[in-house]
Image (spheres, coloured by chain):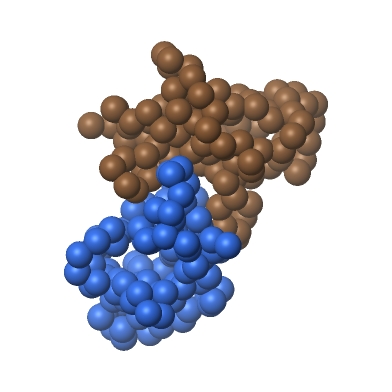
Chain colours: A brown, B blue
Amino acid sequence: NAGVMQNPRHLVRRRGQEARLRCSPMKGHSHVYWYRQLPEEGLKFMVYLQKENIIDESGMPKERFSAEFPKEGPSILRIQQVVRGDSAAYFCASLGENEQFFGPGTRLTVL
Amino acid sequence: AQSVAQPEDQVNVAEGNPLTVKCTYSVSGNPYLFWYVQYPNRGLQFLLKYITGDNLVKGSYGFEAEFNKSQTSFHLKKPSALVSDSALYFCAVRDTGYSNYQLIWGAGTKLIIKP
């Protein structure tokens, strides 16, 4: 039973490029959360999705960031026109009975 | 307002000594409480949870936590610390007074176990 999968594990982009981060939840899980973490800091909630539905995007920046969780395939966090301040670790989690299960994260570096 | 407080940014403990990482919370409904651990450059791993029942819950790696309703606390404990326990620990709460499945996260406590 595979855990939460995220890819890529490391992503390097130049300023102005687009970053696409993928998350496949655990089998049977239909709720996905995205978080951002800066070095030596805590988790910052970004968005909470169910299949084909955004439940809560209160933590998402209003511009350049978007997320989706289609009926088929992984959840995608998309960052357009990346800036250096977007450099961080992005974690996805899927919801089990009560607890969230985390993926290994994608470390985004913007040059 | 919903909140989780981890009052210590860092806790230092000698190997073999007992450890405590503190967590207090504020919610409107009944709390579901969680502890997670994060090792360097890794994702978060679930340690233990309190949903209902016994106030003392046991989790992975010999950790346990005690739910104290009157003090609104859920401190993480281990009787004898190992150097390998050094990591970042996060407390989280779900407020069952709300219908969503969001977790409110503490800021994290860095635990350093010295040999």
Q: Which residue is at the front of the view, A73 or B54? A: B54
Q: Position of residue B94 (x, y in %)?
A: 42, 54
Q: Is residue A71 left or right of residue A86?
A: left
Looking at the figure, which quarter contains the N terminus of chain A? top left
Determine the image quadrant of residue B78. Answer: bottom left
Q: Residue at x 42, y 60 (%)?
A: B29
Who's the residue at 31% across and 40% down the image? A96
Res B77 quadrant in image: bottom left
- Could you say which quadrant of the image residue B51 lies in? bottom left
The residue at the far left in this view is B54
**For this view, does B15 lie left or right of residue B79?**
right
Can residue B109 be seen here?
no
Image height of B73 relative to A62, above or below: below
Q: Give how far across and how far down residue B105 sits, in percent.
A: 51, 58
Residue at point 24% right, 72% down? B55
Q: Is residue A103 above or below residue A69?
A: below
Residue in front for this viewpoint, A30 or B72? B72
Residue visible at 72% across and 38% down in the picture: A61
